[in-house]
Image (cartoon, rainbow, N blue to C red):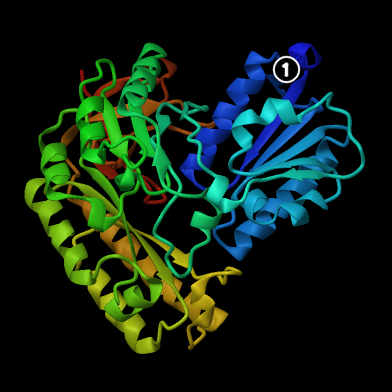
Amino acid sequence: MIDTHIFQDKKAVYYTLGCKLNFSETSTIGKILCEAGVRTVRKGEKADICVVNTCSVTEVADKKCRQAIHKLVKQHPDAFVVVTGCYAQLKPDTVAKIEGVDVVLGAEQKKDLLQYLGNLQKHGSGEAYTSALKDIRSFAPSCSRGDRTRFFLKVQDGCDYYCSYCTIPFARGRSRNGSISSMVEQARQAAAEGGKEIVLTGVNIGDFGKSTGETFFDLVKALDEVEGIERYRISSIEPNLLTDEIIDYVSRSRRFMPHFHIPLQSGSDEVLKLMRRRYDTALFASKIRKIKATMPDAFIGVDVIVGTRGETDEYFGQAYDFLKSLDVTQLHVFSYSERPGTQALKIDHVVSPQEKHCRSQQLLELSDEKTHAFYARHIGQVMPVLLERPKPGMPMHGFTPNYIRVEVPHDDALDNQVVSVRLGDFNADGTALLGTLLP
């Protein structure tokens, strides 16, 4: 048993980098500490414990992690500093040597954070606790709300795909998941806490079921039956795992929203082969057509990486033309970053930083055009919007079922409420439509 007496009245600060899954897991860590007697630090206070949940998807992410640690150590000089997440798993010794760091926890250890805190006494040097890749086996559940209206339900962790450019399988281990019954119970708990919307998160959520002999489609159907949850969104799903039966089911579902986020990574078949992706552009295009045939107003976000090794001018041209031809809503554009230990480093033809930036800008402009056109098509329509409390000084905002951002006049009574709104013109910076509340 862990003696939690030492945690009573202690204060903690949390800093998260990276994906929605990381934010969900940080929230769970926060709950663990809260149950032990630790409260979140208030503005102006010094923390007793600092928790940094890191990302390592790019070299820039690694740098941001180091900067975040240095900043927190400076702001809270006497705090016990815990670093976890992907960067911690991949580079534990490097992180442990950062001044002020006390404990580094890998993917298998972070769920047991309390037992690594000792008596919160700093010893002048960091200690790293990680497991070998083959020993990362457990699934740590997480359903977090944070400060926002929606909950994030972790349904899966790890990845078995080993794409040539990616370190995530080395940071998070093999694909694994909890049971459908446990996911349903967490969704019910979110509903009991007033949750209206849940985003399903994971590393490769379409691969759900490997640990339990179930399927992602089974999960979708089970969650759809949970009373009290009005909206589900599927955060990101591989195109080869987005089956027609899932698409058809979402088109009929009252609770699963017409909103998809599908990683493409490249619109060139040659580059997709170099990336070791498990589909080609023909399959991807067929998925987009299927979605639009059943849900013409569906929002479709697409992940794209520019400047990967092997992406010649010709291949990028093919990718651009393919993306332009797709009836999608938004492109999430990332510049390729060299990751130590990945197979991509063996590929010839390196794209210069200047060319990466140029290609990125071209795709971002294309994305803006597509998003603007999508929003414009909906001006004048009446749609249900789930409103959420804004940051101080900002107008109230929320999202339609198909993820159009809408701004309305501020009214605290409308926080976490679904209201009917007539969609008007764009706001001043073009990032949302102005809405008129209807009786």
- Residue appearing at x 21%, y 63% in the figure: 284
Relative to residue 401, is residue 82 drawn left or right? right
Residue 290 in which image quadrant: bottom left
> x and y percent of residue 23 in the render?
53, 37
Q: Residue furthest front?
A: 134
Q: Residue flagged by tag 1: what amino acid is it?
A: Ile
Say what secondary structure mark 1 lies in.
loop
Among the 4 quarters of the image, the one containing residue 4: top right
Above or below: residue 6 compared with residue 362: above
x 29%, y 77%: residue:
268
Going by the image, does 423 lie left or right of 79?
left
Q: Quadrant of the N terminus?
A: top right
Q: Position of residue 431 (x, y in %)?
A: 38, 48
Query: Is residue 375 something that shows in the picture?
Result: no
Q: Residue furthest left?
A: 293
163 sits to left or right of 244: right
Q: How many marks?
A: 1
122 up-or-down from 185: above or below: below
Q: Position of residue 414 (x, y in %)?
A: 37, 18
Query: Viewer-proximal residue, 27 or 436?
Result: 27
Which residue in the protein does label 1 denote? 2
Instruction: Name the quadrant of the C terminus.
Output: top left
Residue drawn at x 18%, y 45% as measured from the top left: 378
Q: Residues within 10 Å of mark 1 (few under 14, many from 20)?
A: few
Q: In the rendered view, does 101 fall on the left or right side of 162? A: right
Q: Position of residue 301 (x, y in %)?
A: 31, 54
Q: Is residue 117 above or below residue 376?
A: above
